[in-house]
Amino acid sequence: MISFNLRCSKDHEFEGWFRDSATFEKDLKNRRIECPICGDSKLERALSAPNIATSESRAAAKAEQAAQARDKMRDTLRAFRRHVEKTSENVGDRFAEEARKIHYGESATRSIYGKTSLEEARDLHEEGVPVAPIPWIEEVQDN
Ligand SMILES: [Zn+2]
């Protein structure tokens, strides 16, 4: 069964139930459907308000979901950044240099973080220095 919202020539709106859409199209064309209020058979399909509301709320729900996912991701990245900041030393632009020193035992073993170019990171990796790129969220705010 399938339902369609119909409107007669006098603007009465009602819902009609049909076996399938082909049956509906045929009945509509042959004027076999009548308005339950005035008996008019000159009908047209009406866009029902509930359906519009449904698709709107569905879009809103989707947007809400996306926003929540984005917030969650941001929270995760913030928490991750705080964790790194708490447990590692920020060596800034000296990252590659410090990472090498630690790796070759010239500097105290510890966790560090900082900035380096992709090229430098690749070099470090090839030298066997354990480095990993991390997603770094720039704005850190408490909600
Ligand atoms: Zn009517």
Image (cartoon, rainbow, N blue to C red):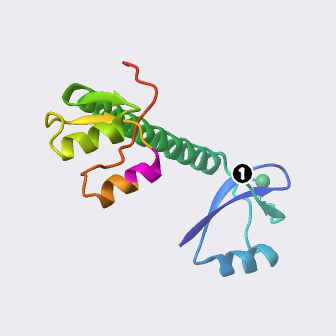
Dominant secondary structure, magenta? helix
Disc 1 Cβ-to-ligand 1 distance below 8 Å: no
**125 vs 87, nearest the viewer:** 125
Looking at the figure, which quarter contains the C terminus? top left
**Residue 118 part of the magenta segment:** yes
60 left or right of 129?
right
Residue at 22%, 31% in the rendered image: 88
Residue at 42%, 34% in the rendered image: 137
Q: Please state the horizontal and vertical placement of residue 110, each as a whole percent of the image.
A: 16, 35
Q: Quadrant of residue 90?
A: top left
Region in magenta: 117-121
Q: Quadrant of residue 94?
A: top left
Q: Which residue is mark 1?
A: 13
Q: Secondary structure at mark 1?
A: strand
Residue most extreme to the front: 106
Q: Please state the horizontal and vertical placement of residue 57, each as a whole percent of the image.
A: 55, 43
**102 vs 142, nearest the viewer:** 102
Q: Please state the horizontal and vertical placement of residue 31, each as a whole percent of the image.
A: 80, 73
**121 vs 137, nearest the viewer:** 121
How many numbered discs? 1
Q: Dot 1: few (<14), some (14–19), or many (≥20) neighbours within 10 Å?
A: many
19 left or right of 35?
left
Q: Which amino acid type is marked by label 1?
A: Glu
Is 59 above or below relative to 79? below
Is 40 above or below relative to 105? below
Q: Please state the horizontal and vertical placement of residue 68, each as a whole percent of the image.
A: 42, 38
**78 vs 84, nearest the viewer:** 84
**Residue 50 part of the magenta segment:** no
